Image (spheres, rainbow, N blue to C red):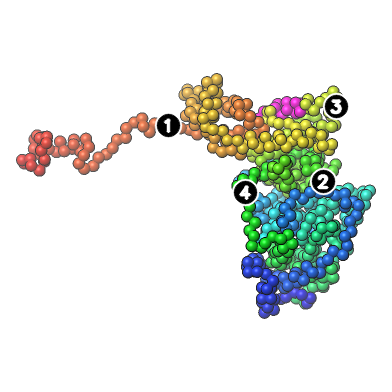
Amino acid sequence: MVWGVSIRRVGTVRSRFSSMKSFFNTSQNQMILTNLAFSYRASSCFAATDVTRRCFASFTSSSKFKTESESKLSYGTGLDESELVVSILGPPNAGKSTLFNRLMCKEANKTYKLASEKKKRKGGAIGRVGSKMHKNKKVLVGGAIVSPVPGTTRDRRECIGRIGGTTFRLVDTAGVDGERIGHLYRHNTKNPLEKQMMQQTLEAARTSDLVLLMLDAKVGVTYDLIETAKWLRKIGGSGQAPTVAILANKLEGDSWVYDASPVLDTIDEVNRVGFGEAIPISAEHGEGLADIAALIEEIQVKKRERLGISEDEEDVEDTSDQEKPLQLAILGRQNVGKSTLVNALLQQQRVLSGETPGLTRDAITVEWSWKGRPVKLVDTAGIRRSVQRDHSNVIEDLAVRDAMRAMKVADVAVLVLDAEARYLQRQELAIADAVVKEGRSIIVVANKMDLIVDAEYTKEEYAEAVTKQMEIRFPLLRKTPVVPMSSLTGECVQDLMPVVFNARDRWARTISTGMLNSWLEEVLFAFPPPRQKGRETKIKYIMQTKGRPPTFLLFCNVSSLPQNYLRYLTRNFQDTFKFFGMEVRLAIKKSAESNPYGTKIKQSWKGVGGWQGRKKRLIRDLREHGRPLQKGRRRRFQPK
């Protein structure tokens, strides 16, 4: 065997771990032991931990090669310099997205199930914007899309990762092979999509402190892996070159550890790639993560020492005065310019964009700051009708589910329209309806105005035409803010963010109870509610129960109000308090049928006291003595 350890060699495992105590402190040892306790293949994890310590010194940046095409890239990361960045690279279908979902922090990234997702729906597909999930498909909610189809991941996806007690910035990338690397350095490539994907992967590797190079251990060392290793040695630029560690994935259990296993020959060949010995893991089953935890912890300690940050210093930030980031989701049909709009807002080529429909798959979250105000911008996949999708391929259904989840956790949703369509599509109305039912605030972006706006037809007329169509076909969204723009040329893109923040402030607004009841008094005086079953309908009181979305409670003497009167109240409320582009939820609570103070409660007295007791004593005395007792005298002194 090259470096594997079988279950029988427990003594060697213990001796290797005892030698590690001088390298790691007590808290880090406890973290590693915690991860090892949940690892099925504990002995192999210890063996690889000793190997990972030697892989750091083996990596040296042999060259500072930088081509002209790379020098033109100017992507902004927007990350803290002290934050550890870990990128996952490798050939297609090596398990990168599976490891990404495994290392993702579920609480920080909100990958838990939402309340609206727990409701069971019949029929599989949910309307025109739903996603029909296949049976026996276990999908991480909110995680990266995972499928056996090579090339599923296209964009560079970031999240907050956590393993043990260490948190870091985790980056998932598209698959890397020799052909795609060649596209990166060609000026006139025939496949611009492949070049954009490699540019995103290049930026992820450049800005990383640690690169996890994954491969399928059952496939072994291929030409693509060798070319990727050569390419990684050339990057780094003038800054600190990233540390590279090789992960041999898809090694479940311990059967491959023995001498007769052909996997050991593959591992021996991987060790000659030049980045030290490989770390055996199983991303799907979570085996071998203790070695990754030790590796990430060591890189983080080195980075803190290089930046002069003390280990005893606690990174505790006072977030009480910090503004909560605005969650902004970009929604729409395919090929309407959503990704182009995101790049125009960020003023950089952050996500893939092009003329090909369905280019975006994962919901890409980008942390951004607009005039000092934090924003989480989410680019989503185009949403087609359920009947138009190819349900034999689960990727599109997963992309739609990811897009709808981004809408559910957003504060404001931007619905992007295509000017070439000339009118609102039914699919766009279905997306708007889903946003309203979820209780989010919505803004309409009339994109591609450069195709129709000219000297005779202005952008104001274009926006007014979209507003009229929205009011006619979706009356609830009348007077919804409409921003005409051209994301391709960048015209009027800067007008979007002020409208977005205004919509978020209106959506989260809290109105005082006195102001609400003053409005209610005026409305009832102008148009009182109709009688129901011959009885006068009274709306006594109104109060706001919560914001985000705005919800109000009406106290009435009936259990429900007619729908036309509720629409009247909603329209008047929106006009008065400017709650346009969102649903105003009016709940009704019926008052008690009877007045608790209207009738007296009959009391049953027992023993001495009360008018009933006096009556009983009077009847008893009349029967016994023939006369009532004299007033002011005790009964025991009365003659018998």
Kindly identify the amino acid type of the residue bearing the numbered disc 1: Glu
User: Which structural element holds mark 1?
Assistant: loop
Q: Which residue is mark 2?
A: 349
Which of label 2 and label 4 is nearer to you? 4
Q: Which residue is mark 3?
A: 454
Marks 3 and 1, how far apart at CA: 65 Å
Kindly identify the amino acid type of the residue bearing the numbered disc 2: Gln
Disc 2 to disc 3: CB gap under 8 Å? no
Which of label 4 and label 3 is nearer to you? 4
Depth order, front residue of 627/38: 38
Q: Which residue is mark 4?
A: 319
Kindly identify the amino acid type of the residue bearing the numbered disc 3: Asp
- Residue range in magenta is 463-476
Q: Quadrant of the N terminus?
A: bottom right
At 75% from the left and 70% from the top, the residue drawn is 53
Residue lying furthest left: 639
In primary-sequence order, the first of circles 3 and 1 is 3
209 versus 116 height, above or below: below
Marks 4 and 1, how far apart at CA: 49 Å
